[in-house]
Amino acid sequence: MTSIDLENLNLVFRVRQKQRIPFKDFLVHQMFRKSVNPYMEIRALSNINLSIRQGDRLGIVGHNGAGKSTMLKMLAGIYPPTSGERRVQGEISSLFELSLGFEPEATGWENIAYRGFLQGETPKTLKHKLAEIAEFSELGEFLASPVRHYSSGMLVRLAFSVATAIDPEILLVDEVLAAGDLAFQKKARRRMEEMIDRAHLIVMVSHDLEALTKFCNRAIWLDHGQIRMQGPTQDVVEAYTDAMNGAVPMAKAA
């Protein structure tokens, strides 16, 4: 039984206030035992309490910088929580950072293997998926060329084709429905619908509120790293849209 539970979870980043400091300043501050470049804390997620169960399709909405992508990366285990608990039952597959693991000097075929292995494939399991990945990408003979010769659209096609050749239990999705040109977006949407049908549990981030309403049965509204509202997708999307359009004051939204 797949599930995700987050209890009183907080995520805080510690970053230096300055990228570079003069060596002279460093020496002077060392003499007085003062930090010339102290840390500052950025609270990315605050007091997150959330339970997601098998069969749930959870959408995440929020303004730019609200913490949506950070939430996905925390769920994926890329960012460990600073405090609180993150409990996951099931194998996680992530669809974000699509071009991760691509080697510019290697061919398309070689990059299919590289990216596939990063996703947990083995030579045996990948062998049975190669033809389908190549066909979906529509790159044909270009797969024999180094990907540094690819256009950005061709690279997106290859990345999406490999990334979605998985059988997910828990699927995390970040804005990949906007991949490629219009014709490829239609194929990508159909592919995503098939994956959503197969996945046991899904968490999806998208600025396409119509897509979230279509695919997700639940949603949360993130506001400056905090869950401001959660519930049925239509209700959350309407409240978020009204707030963004100024129909209700931000401080009084449900």
Image (cartoon, grey):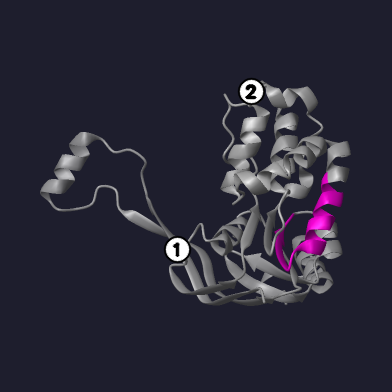
Label 2 with label 1: CB-CB less than 8 Å: no
Residue position marked by numbered label 2 in the rendering: 146
Residue that lies at the very extreme toward the left in this rendered image: 31
Callout 2, which amino acid? Pro
Residue 86's x, y, as percent? 52, 72
Quarter of the picture holding the N terminus: bottom right
The reply to whether the magenta stretch includes residue 205 is: yes
Residue position marked by numbered label 1 in the rendering: 12
Residue 204's x, y, as percent? 71, 60
How many other residues sit within 10 Å of disc 2, few (<14), some (14-19) or many (≥20)? Answer: some
**Residue drawn at point x = 59 percent, y = 70 percent:** 226
Write down the quadrant of residue 150 in the picture: top right
Residue 33's x, y, as percent? 15, 53
Q: Is residue 54 left or right of residue 11?
A: right
Q: Which residues are magenta?
A: 188-206
Q: Nearer the viewer, residue 59 or 103?
A: 103
Q: Is residue 124 left or right of residue 199?
A: left
Write down the quadrant of residue 134 in the picture: top right
The reply to whether the magenta stretch includes residue 122 is: no
